[in-house]
Image (tube, rainbow, N blue to C red):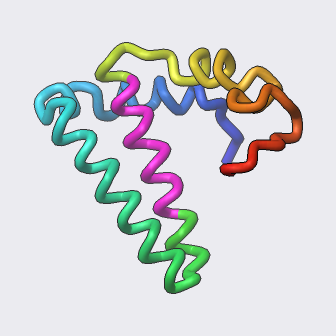
Amino acid sequence: MSVISIKEAQELMKKLYLERDKERGQERTFLKLVEEVGELAESLLLQDKEKISEEIADILAWTLSIANLLEIDAIKEFQEKYNEICPGCSESPCSCDSV
């Protein structure tokens, strides 16, 4: 299996799921993301690394689906916000007290 970029992953989610996501709508698509976050929490408590990996993949997929619904270029926004520095303290590595 070859490595794909986040941009390619977002395009894949668009190809596979955009029409279903449109039918489901933003609110229900977001609820699916929240459900996956809950499943990740359970997996972390159980220290089940295989399940943790699966849930992280699901969270990424649902996040990209939401970005597609809203026509947001996820990687562009990520790069603008996290431009080699912490957006909170403007340092690298981060020196924020609250993180």
Residue at 21 percent across and 31 percent down: it is 26
Q: Is residue 90 above or below residue 53?
A: above
Between 18 and 72, the one lying in front of the other is 72
Q: In the displayed image of the protein, which residue is found farthest to the left?
A: 23
Q: Is residue 79 above or below residue 20?
A: above
Q: Quadrant of residue 65?
A: top left
Residue 57 is covered by the magenta coloring: yes
User: Which secondary structure type mostly characterizes the magenta part of the structure?
Assistant: helix
Q: In the displayed image of the protein, which residue is found farthest to the front?
A: 97
Give the percent coordinates (x, y) of residue 92: 88, 34
Residue at 36 percent across and 65 percent down: it is 38
Residue at 52 percent across and 23 percent down: it is 74
Q: In the displayed image of the protein, which residue is found farthest to the right?
A: 92
- Report the side of 75 relative to 51 (left or right): right
Residue at 18 percent across and 36 percent down: it is 27
Give the percent coordinates (x, y) of residue 66: 34, 31
Give the percent coordinates (x, y) of residue 18: 28, 26
Q: Quadrant of residue 37?
A: bottom left
Between 2 and 59, the one lying in front of the other is 59
Give the percent coordinates (x, y) of residue 84: 82, 26
Magenta segment: 54-67
**Exactly how many numbered labels are in the figure?**
0
Residue 11 is covered by the magenta coloring: no
Between 96 and 3, the one lying in front of the other is 96
- Report the side of 22 relative to 11 (left or right): left
